[in-house]
Amino acid sequence: MERIVNTSNRVDVVIAEIDPEAVEITYGDQGESVEAVDVAPYPTRRIIVLAPTKQAGQEHAESLGIEPVAIVTPRSPHASYGMVADEIAEAPGLSVDVVGELMQHAGPSLATTGGE
């Protein structure tokens, strides 16, 4: 097996060449149906939580099984400044207007907005 490793200051990439005939692919029973699936968040995802209070944000994060990089509240709308996040989660108890206000502060922290 030959490995080619390209390294940069951002990402390490390993490309491996394999013999396709040496790989055995098996499929599960295709007749099974799934009504609901709980998917745990990827443990290294960076998530900002919008919440009415810090305590409510922490409780929501614990219920999701995550450790947020910031909890943005009406009293601390700048909590995510300088952070980079992959996702923003909303805790229950926020009005649409408050979510819109908090998103103006937290939105630029999303990795997809070019803030990185």
Image (cartoon, rainbow, N blue to C red):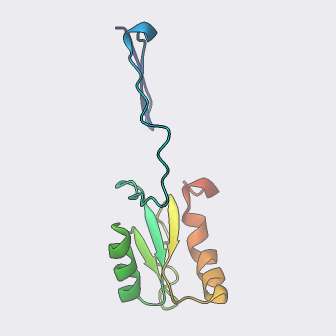
Q: Is residue 26 left or right of residue 81?
A: left
Q: Position of residue 66 (x, y in %)?
A: 35, 66
Can I make out residue 67 in this image? no
- Quarter that holds the N terminus: top left
In this view, the residue in front, 46 or 90, is 90
Residue at screen point 43% across, 78% down? 71
Q: Kindly indicate the quadrant of the structure image that contains residue 109.
A: bottom right
Q: Kindly indicate the quadrant of the structure image that contains residue 64.
A: bottom left
Residue at screen point 40% across, 87% down? 56
Q: Position of residue 26 (x, y in %)?
A: 40, 25
Residue ranking furthest to the front: 31
Residue at screen point 42% across, 73% down? 70
Q: Position of residue 114 (x, y in %)?
A: 62, 54
In this view, the residue in front, 57 or 110, is 57
Please count the marks in the image.
0
Can I make out residue 23 in this image? yes
Please, is residue 21 above or below residue 66 in the view?
above
Q: Kindly indicate the quadrant of the structure image that contains residue 61.
A: bottom left
Q: Is residue 65 left or right of residue 73?
A: left
Q: Position of residue 88 (x, y in %)?
A: 52, 68
Q: Is residue 78 left or right of residue 65?
A: right
